[in-house]
Image (cartoon, rainbow, N blue to C red):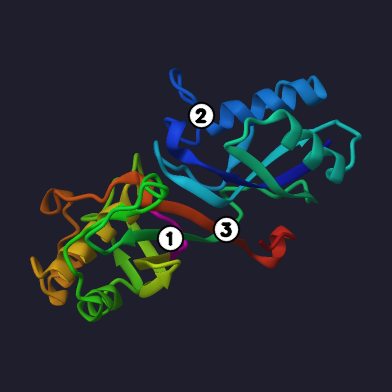
Amino acid sequence: MRNIAVQLEYDGTHFVGSQYQAQGRTVQAEVEGAWQRLTGEDRRWTFAGRTDAGVHAQGQVANVCTTTTQTVATVQRALNALLPPDIAVRATWEVSAEFHARRSAVQRRYRYTILNQVAPSALQRYRWWHVWTPLDLGAMREAARYLVGEHDFGSFGVVDQGSTVRRCMLAHCLGQERDGYALVVIDLAANGFLRHMVRTITAILVDVGRGKLVPSDVRPLLERADRSLVQVMAPAHGLSLMAVQYGTAAALNI
């Protein structure tokens, strides 16, 4: 039995999420359907991270155990021919039998993109969150610094079971001019994320940027770890899963 991993890029606009659900179109169902047409195998794929409806990915990772004899290069070309145009296989690897796209991951990195100007963008309306009020980038950066380190992020997201403690390695806000658009880009990297955690953090940072909160307001949210304290969440369409990092034992680095 072989273990094959792929790096996926997808436009989440017309999906109800990445993982399989009883109703609605999912990335996993599309990938598994393409795999069955390619190999004749009815296999369940494992994904590195769960993305919600409308959330995109540039560096999602998934793996499958298979008996196919096709090369990884052939697998990549064939899957791209079979998948719909809003999913692309960017890379394919053969990995060790122990590799597990979710459990072997040591870090995931997300990016949230905000269009911060008066005029919206018609072309990027499903990629950027349009916030027309000017944002104080310095205040947002100061607030983001509180997030770095190991904290209980219970105020910022939910989990089905287990701990809400996570280690955040990167929380960075950057202003960019791109093709005449004024953007604010928020990058977050952690060993794991709670459901809705990135979108909730983004909404809090935007409220800091708008002056509704001060940077130090982030600290008590971390200390109290109470989801009922935070009622705001950024829309899904500005968020992308950018990359997944694996340790050397997993024999895969992306």
Residue drawn at (78%, 51%) of the image:
95
**Residue wearing tag 2:** 26
- The image quadrant of residue 86 is top right
Does the rendering let one see residue 170? no
Front residue of 201 and 152? 201
Residue ranking furthest to the left = 212
Q: Which residues are magenta?
A: 189-193
Label 3: few (<14), some or many (≥20) within 10 Å? many
Residue drawn at (20%, 75%) of the image:
136
Residue 23 part of the magenta segment = no
Decide whether the magenta segment is chiefly helix, strand or loop. loop
Front residue of 176 and 148? 176
Label 1: few (<14), some or many (≥20) within 10 Å? many
**Residue wearing tag 3:** 244
Sequence-wise, which precedes: disc 3 or disc 1? 1
**Secondary structure under badge 2?**
loop
Mark pair 2, 1: CA separation: 21 Å
Q: Amino acid at mark 2?
A: Thr
**Secondary structure under badge 3?**
strand
**Secondary structure under badge 1?**
strand
Mark pair 3, 1: CA separation: 12 Å
Residue 90: image x %, image y %?
Answer: 69, 50
**Residue wearing tag 1:** 111
